[in-house]
Image (tube, helix red, strand yellow):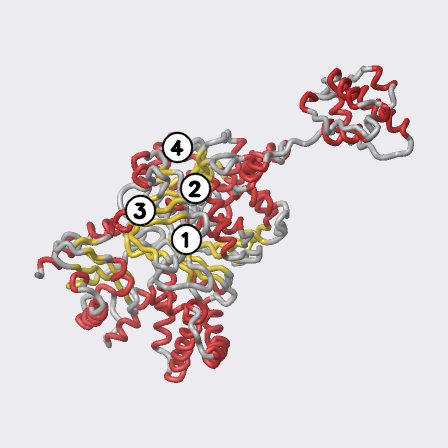
Amino acid sequence: MNAAFLQLGIATSFRCKRSNNKSGEKNVLKKQLVASGCSHTAFWRTPSCTWSSDHWKAVVKREETCFPNSNEWSDKELSTNDDGRMGKNVFYYLWNNRLKPRKKTATAKEEKRREETLLNLFFDNVHGLTGVQNRVALAKRTKEGTWYKWTWKQYGEQVVKTANGLRALGFEFGDHVTILSANCPEWLFADLATMCLGGATAGIYPNDVPEQIVFIHQNFDAKFFFVDTYKALAKLKPFLHQLTQVKYIIILSSQGTTTSENEEDIWNMDSRIISYARLLELGQVYTSTSPNFVEDRARKITPDTFCMTVYTSGTTGQPKGACYSHQNIYCVGTTIAQELQCQGKDILLSFLPLCHVAERIQSLFLAIAGRCTVYFAESIQRVQQELPQVRPTIFMCVPRVWEKLYQALHAEFETSSGMKRHFLHQTLLFGRLARLHRNYQKCVSRGAIIEWLILSLLIVRKIRVRLGLDRCHTFASGAAPLSEEVAMFFGDLGMDIRQIYGQSESTGIISYSPKGAVRPGNAGKVPCGIHVKLGENNEILCKGPNVFLGYYKDPIATRNALDEDGYLHTGDVGMLDEQGYLWVTDRLKDLIKTAGGKFVAPQKIEGRLKMFPGISHVLVIGDRRPYCVALITLDESQLHNICKRARINVQSMEQVVKNEKIVELVNSYVQQVNSGLASYEQIKYFRLLPEDFTIEKEEMTPTLKIRRRQVERRYQAWIDAMYMQQ
């Protein structure tokens, strides 16, 4: 079609309207076609109402510049009236169906793909298409103790500014960014800004040793490096020269320095260092001249684009980078948001490391898909203090946090007065009946339900208010199995903890406990779109849009994890029951095979023993050995109660673990657990360690799972001594 015709048509938004003034109509149409270059004189001399369809076809064929692709026009499109003449509405038809300029639209397939990214959902939230533009999206505590908040609109503006700052520094499509920071809004600004520009991010744990930080940078080919404080960067000073691919190091905040001299030393440390404020200044030019560039780029990114790597903390060896596509994170975010029926009013508390997929699910995937508000805790150690202030509506955490809460409540119940203890016992008793009715559809008398409702108002509500969970409608646990005892205890208090099962390679999700059917001990049911089956040795295999792309720059490990049919080999042993619940019994690599050829699942034994008051961690050992032994640590926060129970004076931890009465107390716990185990599973000897396992000593992962091999190496002499006792 002639360009002049298109331009004129767009400028005038030409629409032919029905009118009694036929000559006026024809004159308007004539002007449009003359402007397009149509010169066939017969076209204007003959009234349109007297033209035959053949005449119309002849004109259309001759004026191909005005009617492109006219050979595809059908007789129906140029149909005639009963008298064999083409009516005046042919002009309307030609304009509306063939000539009217249209904005190019995506095909249905392209439109579907375009929509299925978190970035599209994010900008929909930012622009108010989901009704949350002016609602709080993020909140961070200031030095004064108040909360500084960002609305979704401000959230989007900050992401765009950060992205434009990266553009000013030379960021290109496909570049990689690393982030070493505690949880904060700036973490998410950098993360989303990178993805909007078509790049990929990788998080680094703040407590990682410098050698591991260097390894991740070299493995991930990062060109931009975000660090939260000067203090964190100062620790890396001797290693910065090894980060050869990094073009710029951006410091997110000035927190962590005490003097201006220290700050000046930082700037002189490396010429690549700039502040986050300076990054935003540099991007201001792009923000002013091309304000829509970042969003337009983000909305064009397809679901199969690589966007994120989560380095597995791992219990052995160097970490591996699990790579995700936009489809992976969209699938997980929308699946959980739909399951939890998020309506844009939920509140989340971010405290687990954002480097881990569990927290990324909560603070990024779910927060965007469910339009939730994220409050950032100061640290994982302050969760119990932060909960009553934030009062989240969804509380997702790791089993260790639930165990800590359980032990604190259990200890309080034990030390309560006689009457109070009686009411607490009654509450748990009727709460159990209510839980069975709620999740197993068991028949319970109306009187028992009424009794439970009264007790929940008088007692349970007070407990939940003190915990800061009075507004919470969803309780969840992930990253490791939650013991049945802990799950049942909170369930009896009306807080059904929904187990989420997954791993880094499945973008954190394979199954979860369905609402109204929470069964402690299992991993829930597999959601629609994800397929699970059992392979050799009952290994759980998974396939679906949640399965990762592979390990970054590690094709051998990728081939070991993904088979030819696209199934992820999880390395977990499990079973599927008749009702569709998935049960995870242990890790294949953690299974103990005794010298007698018997298989022992250590996590089951460890979980039972950890339920006793005062026990912090347990590690069962026995692979290729004649029997099982255990290393046990005590909870220092419960030291007073432990000593009181053993009827000794409070002493230091080093003295307590050597005290015979303490050893006897723990031995009684071990024997109780042994009574429910097969002979080859029973713990024959144990040792109490003088200090607990910690992340800093690399004995635990950032999600508080024990690094078994690391602990065994450290206490090898103690373990060998227990096998010498036979």
Rendering coords of residue 376 (x, y %) = 48, 54
Q: Are marks 4 and 3 in contact (CB under 8 Å)?
A: no
Left or right, 160 with reference to 205: right
User: Looking at the image, is mark 4 or mark 3 earlier in the sequence?
Assistant: 4
What is the distance, in whole Å, between disc 4 and disc 2 at their CAs?
Answer: 13 Å
Left or right, 464 with reference to 421: right
Q: Which mark is residue 42?
A: none
User: Looking at the image, is mark 4 or mark 1 earlier in the sequence?
Assistant: 4
Neighbor class of circle 3 (other Cα within 10 Å; few <14, some 14-19, many 20+) is some
In the rendered image, the vertical position of residue 676 relative to residue 452, given as above or below: above
Asked whether 396 or 539 is in front, the reply is 539
Q: Which element type, helix, strand or loop, lies under badge 3?
A: loop
What residue do we see at 43% from left, 41% from top?
179
What is the distance, in whole Å, between disc 2 and disc 3 at their CAs?
Answer: 19 Å
Q: Amino acid at mark 2?
A: Ile
Asked whether 412 or 607 is in front, the reply is 607
Q: Name the residue tied to disc 1.
A: 526
Q: Amino acid at mark 3?
A: Gly
Q: Name the residue tied to disc 4.
A: 221
In the rendered image, the vertical position of residue 515 relative to residue 573, given as above or below: below
In the rendered image, the vertical position of residue 582 relative to residue 235, given as above or below: below
Q: Which element type, helix, strand or loop, lies under badge 1?
A: loop
What is the distance, in whole Å, between disc 4 and disc 3 at their CAs?
Answer: 21 Å
Q: Name the residue tied to disc 3.
A: 314
Left or right, 590 with reference to 184: left
Q: Which element type, helix, strand or loop, lies under badge 4?
A: loop
Q: Which mark is residue 179?
A: 2
